[in-house]
Structure formats: structure tokens, C-alpha cells
Image: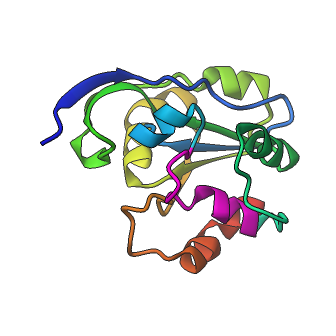
Amino acid sequence: MPEIKHIIHPIPPFYDSMSRVLILGSFPSVKTRESGFFYGHPQNRFWPLMTALFNEEKVPKTIEEKSDLLRRNHIALWDSIHECDIIGSSDSSIKNAVPNDISQILEAADIRQIFTNGKKSHEIYMKYCYPKTGREDICLPSTSPANAAFRLDSLIKAWEILKG
């Protein structure tokens, strides 16, 4: 059985001054931490979802391709949690969560809407970030492979709100 580990988020936020939408995940999976960029698990549907939503030609594979897709579509990415105790990649195992400070993104970019990717991110956002920002988020269904209730076509329908 995997053991609980205390982990500090290893990936910096992705944004620039042109970012208009902020998507917050919960905490990076083991595979994502290994890859060094958001949604690095090959079974996570985030990148196929973004590809479909924004009519991209192909699913980005490299960090550079993923970054370019985000920039073209004015999307900022980060996670609600800065550090926590976690078993493997399991959101349900997260304990002692310390939130990320998203103010640096909100100050640098004209973020018009904040979306949370899944219930755990939404829970952390509402508990720690909302009291500071006063800005409501929109909770979207998780793109994680653990969210088997949503197939890609269902995720696309739910996430279309992202396009405004």
C-alpha cells in the first residue's frame, strides 16, 4: 500500500498578461509531477478536451505545444493546493492542504472567470481562496481518469462554458 507523503507543489503557475480564464486543478498527480507540467498523466482528458474545445488540429504532446495552446486561448493554469499530505495521486486522500496564493495571477492578468477542475479543487478554492478573492468559481467535472462517470463527449459539453 502506498504511503502518505507530504508534498510541495513543484510546478509554477502558467499565465501571462493576456490570460483571461484561470483553471485550477486540485494537486498534480504523480505522473504530472514527473512530467513537470499540468495534466501530465497520459489518461487525463484535459489536453484532448482543450483540443476539441478550441478546434486545435492535434492534441499537444510537449510542454511547448501545451503552452502555445494555452497562450492562444488566453488560459492560465494552476492548482488550488500548494502543499498537502497525499497518498499517490488520490484527491480523496488529501489532508492538511495549504492553498496556493492565486493573487499573483489575478494581479498580472485580466482574469474574467475562474474555473475549478473537479470537486476537490472547488472545495479548496471555496474554503481558502474565495474568502480572499471574493470571486466565485465555476466547478467543472474533473478531467481525471478517476472520473469515469464522464466520457470525453460529456466533458466537452460541460466545459463549453469555458469559451464564453
The image position of residue 64, as x and y in percent, is: 78, 38
| Among the 4 quarters of the image, the one containing residue 35 | top right
Nearer to the camera, 70 or 1? 1
**59 part of magenta stretch:** no
The residue sitting at the left extreme is 1
Residue that appears at 68% across and 65% down? 161
**50 part of magenta stretch:** yes
The image position of residue 115, as x and y in percent, is: 59, 50
In which quadrant is the C terminus drawn?
Answer: bottom right
| Among the 4 quarters of the image, the one containing residue 86 | top left
Question: In this rendering, does residue 29 appear at all?
Answer: no
Question: In this rendering, does residue 101 appear at all?
Answer: yes
- In this rendering, the answer to whether 7 lies above or below 115 is above
Residue that appears at 50% across and 23% down? 10
Colouring rule applied to residues: rainbow
- In this rendering, the answer to whether 151 lies above or below 127 is below
Residue 7 lies left or right of residue 3; in this view the side is right
The image position of residue 81, as x and y in percent, is: 42, 31
| Among the 4 quarters of the image, the one containing residue 97 | top left
Residue 120 lies left or right of residue 100; in this view the side is left
Nearer to the camera, 32 or 16? 32
Residue that appears at 58% across and 26% down? 102
- The boundaries of the magenta stretch are 39-52
